[in-house]
Image (cartoon, rainbow, N blue to C red):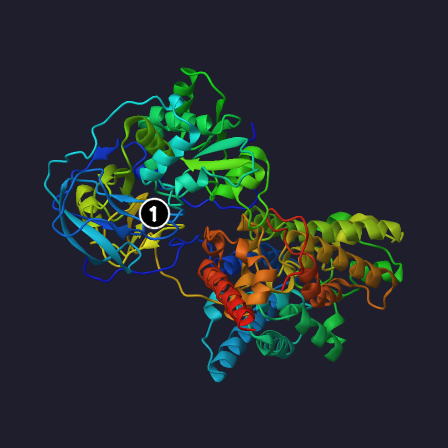
Amino acid sequence: MRLPTFRGGIHPPESKYLTENKEIETLVPRGELVYPMSQHIGAPCAPIVKKGDRVLAGQKIADTGAFVSAPVMSSVSGTVKEIGNRMTISGALETCVAVESDGLFERAAPPRRKDFRKLKPAECIKIIREAGLVGMGGATFPTHVKLSPPPGKKIKWIIVNGAECEPFLNCDNRLMIEHPEPIIGGLEICLHIFPEAKGIIAVENNKPEAIMRMSGELSKRRGKIGVIPHKVKYPQGAEKMLIYTVTGQEIPPGALPAEVGCLVLNVSTLAHIWYAVTDGVPVLDRVISVTGDAVVSPKNIIAPLGTSVRELIDAAGGFSREPARILSGGPMMGISMRSIDVPIVKGTSGILALSSKSAPTFEESNCVRCGRCIAACPMGLWPSALDRAARLRQYSVFEQNGGMNCVECGSCAYVCPSRRFLTQICRDGKAGVVAERKKQKEGSAKR
Amino acid sequence: MNTPLVISSSPHIRAGTSTREIMANVIGALVPAGLASVYFFGQEVVAVIAVCVASCVISEAAWQKLSGAKITVSDLSAALTGLLLAYNLPPTIPLWMGAIGGAFAMIIVKHFFGGLGQNIMNPALAARAMMLSSWPVAMTTWTLDGVSGPTPLAVIKLQGALPSIADIFIGRVGGCIGETSSAALLLGGAYLIWKGIISWRIPAVYIVTVAALSALFGREGGPVAEVLSGGLILGAFYMATDYATSPMTPHGQIVFAFGCGLIASLIRAFGGYPEGVSYSILIMNLAVPIIDRLTPPRVFGEAKRHAAK
């Protein structure tokens, strides 16, 4: 049978074997946990606690009134040690709340059981907002915003993103294998919010155990949910590619998934929706694949948010060889870190330590016009032309050629035999277009 | 952790294939045709190949040295141009002419236009065209087993007795060094398609167009002899597919290859030359910017097409 997929894409070495059969282990953090105020797309939060305050696990420590935002909780009980600038995964200094754990993990609210079916959709969305839920696949878009599509847009499909197409990562895979119930529970909550929608669980075909476990769990229940295995290809987990694979619809440039009646949620996000709505537990921890060829024993770890990356690497046995790059996320879209003394956040799906052998550095050479970037681009763009426009700062040409559609998946740069920094330059081009637009807006405002 | 970490923009891993590896693969694919040529034409072809390759590599290095650019001969593209140039010359060509051809290809055709990937014409073919107009006799003297004689395409043009298809296929006919054995060239071409270095589109469309038009024009010898004779197989698999001088998108490649087939057939059937492959590719090379502009890929989610660049 031919499995559904999308146009373009690449097949990087999966490197999943390092952690795919490793059961999720729990990490108990020592000492200090650090919570950046901006762990999501949208307005950053402001601290609502003071230095010296005692906080409990699950207690809200930062929030904002902005709609596109999500509150931050303390993941442990302890004392607020400091509120100030700390380095985060991106290497930038950001306002953070540091909490010294007392090791008791005293909960702010006792766990409770609630039947979500007795709640109104609006109440569910409110709980989800208050639980600090964001897209846990890495995009960190606030979930309550996603669950509030513009009026008039009917949601017909809720797609569960279990593609996990990034090489090395297995956090979603292991979650589907070990905890299918909360994922499907979370999906049922979303279907309760959108009663006319159909649930589809989309999993890449290289995760047979996850597909089996999810289907097995579904067979115990009744409802409009199906599992769709699809072809293994990067970037299958990109929202637009996944919607196309599952429904055959292309989202028009600049539009949201709701435009084509879709809503895509990551498996980990759904599990947290379930914990938030039925158990009253906000987002306090997440599963992280700590892997790469430079760690001693790669594993999947569930760790409280705010734990330092150093502790995670120590939990995986430390470094086995000199790491050349340490990444947050996968090798295709992850962020390279300057230091490992930074806290994990809601969007941290993996910590990857790669040696210079597996992630060598390259020098650029001339474009030979081989066309591999065009064939690889899932968005149907012409990366080498965008590269040229962006380097020449011809931002209007960049925009005309559809550069703003770039999803920064990295496929073009991955395949480029001249090792050109296509994705990086596209990012620059997009930023250039945005700056240009802003300038124009200001210019016309003056006039 | 003693050395500082590498800070990079994603992606942090790259595919194995490098420009050098691509060039090396094309050179490797051309080896069987070279061996066949030595077998049919004798050892003098080795000298022609050596001189052309050396001339290209030395010219590129010297130009880059003089112009203060980074010397990039290790990417093997100059060596490949030299090899292709030699393959487009008669076995009896005086070696000094080959050397001048190589220097012309590298300096004037390639580096005057900006070097690798920037040239607007195929360097080897442009050099051949220059040589053909400079030294017409030396460039059109074809020998086989020490005897001068016309190529199969010249035979068709002059309406003489054509060699057997089998001889044309394995290469027991007069012609340029590299074009003689279609069998060896097809072997290498199949390897390149299998390795994903070239797509099937350009060679297939080019060859099918020539075959169809030769039938339409009622050429003597029939489509099979037409396709296997002359430089078509060499041109279709190795010259028209040159990345720098062919369109980048699948649609553009089809348009380009059809144009090549059309022009080659017109020259062969109605032109003054018996062979039209190299001119067809050179002419279509010049059309590549406009073909690229008219055949951009379709942006995901977009119905309309925008012009590229």
Residue B238 visible? The answer is yes
Element on which disc 1 rests: loop
Residue placed furthest toward the bottom: B66
Q: Residue at x 72, y 50 (%)?
A: B205
The relative height of residue A435 versus residue A131 in the rendered view (above or below) is: below
In which image quadrant can residue A130 be found?
A: top left
User: Where does the image place residue A149, in percent across and percent down from the top left?
Assistant: 50, 39
Q: Residue at x 56, y 46 (%)?
A: B194
User: Where does the image place residue A250, in percent across and percent down from the top left?
Assistant: 59, 42
* Position of the C terminus of chain B by quadrant: bottom right
Locate residue B233 relative to residue B56 in the image: left or right: right
The relative height of residue A188 versus residue B51 in the rendered view (above or below) is: above
In which image quadrant can residue A19 be found?
A: top left
- Residue type marked 1: Gly
The relative height of residue A85 versus residue B119 in the rendered view (above or below) is: above
Query: For mark 1, what is the residue?
Result: A329
Residue B168 visible? The answer is no
User: Where does the image place residue A161, in percent across and percent down from the top left?
Assistant: 44, 35
The relative height of residue A52 versus residue A114 in the rendered view (above or below) is: below
Question: Badge 1 sits on which subunit?
Answer: A
User: Where does the image place residue A21, in percent across and percent down from the top left?
Assistant: 30, 31
